[in-house]
Each structure stands twice: as structure tokens, then as C-alpha cells.
Amino acid sequence: MDTMKAAVFEKQGSFVLKDVPVPSLAGDYHVLVEVEAVSICGTDVHITADPPGYIATDGTTLGHELCGTIIEKGKNVTHLDVGDRVVVNPNNYCGVCVYCRKNLPNQCSNIEALGIDYDGAFAKYVCIHSKVAYKIDKTVSPETAACAEPLACAINGLNKVNIKPGDSAVVIGAGPIGLMAAMLLKASGIANLFILETSEYRIDFARKLNLGSVLNPLKDDARKVIYDKTEIGADFVFDMTGSQIAPSIQLVRKGGSVVLFGVNKNSRTEIAQSEITTKEIAVLGTWLANATFPQAIKIIEEKSIDLASLITDVMPLDEIHSGIKKLASGQAIKIIIKP
Ligand SMILES: [Zn+2]
Ligand SMILES: [Zn+2]
């Protein structure tokens, strides 16, 4: 049996590089993909932490943000061919549950996540269902294409609101998805963009991207800066951290929208509900990607935003442990593994 090197989450506290069998086609609708590039996600950091901040199935090869080339396909796959380059929606949905039939496949009752629930792409080959594989142009760099999934999530968040040229927005948290959201907001015509971040590394990084005013709420009076500029508060506030709903409600204008992106399951925040009522604020959650891969692929192919500037490191699979450590330390934005 042919084997390949894979980065496997064996059990809590044990994440190892080891030889595993090369996967074979799991079914007639599946494709076998040779992985060109796969990005380390914050979720991978949480899964491999001890104690873990996110639960994966023991014995699973991690890695879910990938770009690769199809080397074999099941006999019922009609929309893709061997040789096509693809990106993948890692959250495979069933298509028949009540949520799927309400056009909410990201809320599918039977959702299964690549590289978390079943074997992912920190390996040379990965087998996926063809319905979650999307063709992407071969002229795009594989490193940039590997960012399609987080970009599709960011787009899903922006799709929740109606952005108009000249509007103002605040992004709280300048991690990879926060910076992608900021880039999309700027490209969508947001005139006044404020990015709030407390990590010095990320503040410096965000400033170099020239997307808007980067403020450190521990040092700057962010509320004053935002109200001085907008007079009434921001039209939109995006909380990428999962814990900043209270300041979001302070910073948004009356009638504005707060979009909650990040997930922090431990966060419990006291808010004055009356402020949401009397300011007539829309508070919207957004989760994963929903029908946003086609948009993400267009944006990547047309280089509508400079995604490549978010890639701070490219490493071989052998260095995955140092990559995860580096991302956990906050000294990187997007780290790409080339298996
Ligand atoms: Zn991810
Ligand atoms: Zn479903």
C-alpha cells in the first residue's frame, strides 16, 4: 500500500507527523486531490492546544484550507475533471436536511468538517466530495488560492449587511479574517475604516496595509477618534474576536449594524439591551461560508484585494509544528504549508 506523510491529531496533546495510507476514492461522487498548498487556521492551533480550545476527532489528519489538483475522480463527477485545480469548502453538507433545504447548508444538521471530523489536507493527497470542490484558475498562486475558505467566510459576513460607497466601518480584531474583511470593506467603497487591535505585531502589520486608521483601544481613545470622524458612530461594526459585542454597540451609529464573526465560547458579556432597542441596532451573527465560494474565487482570480500580502510564511509539511507554534504566538498572519 502506498503511504504518505500526514500531520495527524492522534489525541489530546498529541499531534504528530507520520506515514499513513494514501487515500483512495471514497465514492463515485468523490475526487482525489493532490494538495498544492494548505493554510494553517486558528482552528488548527485550538485543536492541537492542550487542553484543546476546539474538538477534533482522534486520529484525524488536520488541514482544511487548501488548494490542489484533481488526480482522480469518481464516475459520477461531471462538473470537474482530472487536472482541474480546485479549492474546497471544508464543511460538507448533506443537502437534504431541513436547514440545507432552507438554503442554509452552513447550518446543516449533518455537517462534517474536513480536517476536523474526517481526514484533511496536511498531507500530499486528500479525498473530498466533489460538491464542495470549486474550480479555480491555474494562473492563481496556490498559496493565495489556499485562502479561499477564510475569504468565503469573510464574504458571508459582509453579505449580511448592505454596504454603500462612502459608509464607515469598524473592524475589531486584525487577524487574517479581520484583515480580509477590512480589505473587502475598502474595496466595497467604505470611506472611513477603523481597525481595532491590541497586539503590537498585528497593529504594525495592519498599518502597513494602509486600509484605514489602526487603533489600539488599550492606548487610544478609539471611541473619540471614531465619533470625531463620523459624528454619529460607524455604520457597521464587525467583531472578529467573539467577545466585543459591548464596545461594538457603543461604536455603531443609531440604525447601524453589528456583525458578530469570531467565536469565543467562553465569552460572557453584560450588555444593556435597551441600547440595542433605542439605537435600533441590527445585531447579526455570521457563521462559515454560505454560497460565497464563487465570489471568493472571482476575487482571488481577479486580484480584487491583495490577499498575497497576508501570507507571512510558507513552509514544508515537516515544519508544521513550528508553523502552528508561530501562529499561536501571534507572530504571523497566514502561514501556508506546501506538503
Ligand atoms: Zn479555518
Ligand atoms: Zn444538511
Image (cartoon, rainbow, N blue to C red):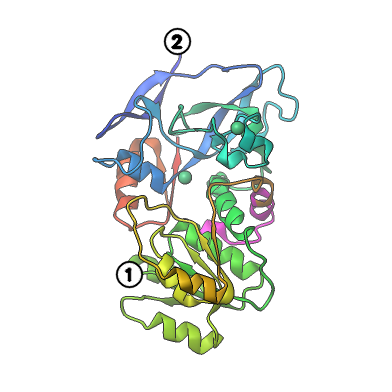
Along the viewing direction, whichever of 183 and 273 lies nearer the viewer: 273
Q: Earlier in the sequence, mark 2 or mark 1?
A: 2
Q: Amino acid at mark 1?
A: Glu
Q: Main secondary structure of the magenta part?
A: helix
Residue 200: x percent and y percent? 32, 69
| Quarter of the figure that contains the C terminus | top left
Q: Which mark is residue 303?
A: none
The amino acid type, in three-letter code, at marker 2 is Met
User: For the residue with label 1, is its CB less than 8 Å from the closest atom of ligand 1?
Assistant: no
Secondary structure found at label 1: helix
Residue at numbered disc 1: 200
The quadrant of the picture showing ligand 2 is: top right
Q: Position of residue 246 (x, y in %)?
A: 41, 69
The residue tagged with tag 2: helix, strand or loop? loop
Q: For residue 188, what is the image quadrant?
A: bottom right
Q: Position of residue 139 (x, y in %)?
A: 66, 46
**Structural crowding at the residue carrying mark 1, measured as other residues with C-alpha within 10 Å and reported as few (<14), some (14–19) or many (≥20):** few
Q: Which residues lie in the magenta part?
A: 296-309
Residue 49, visible in the rendered structure: yes
Q: Is residue 158 left or right of residue 164?
A: left
The residue that appears at 69% across and 46% down in the rendered structure is: 294
Q: Which residue is mark 2?
A: 1
As for residue 287 lying within the magenta part, the answer is no
Residue 209 pos. (x, y %): 50, 70
Q: Let me know if residue 212 appears in the view.
A: no
Q: Residue at x 67, y 29 (%)?
A: 83
Q: Is residue 219 rendered to the left or right of residue 256?
A: left
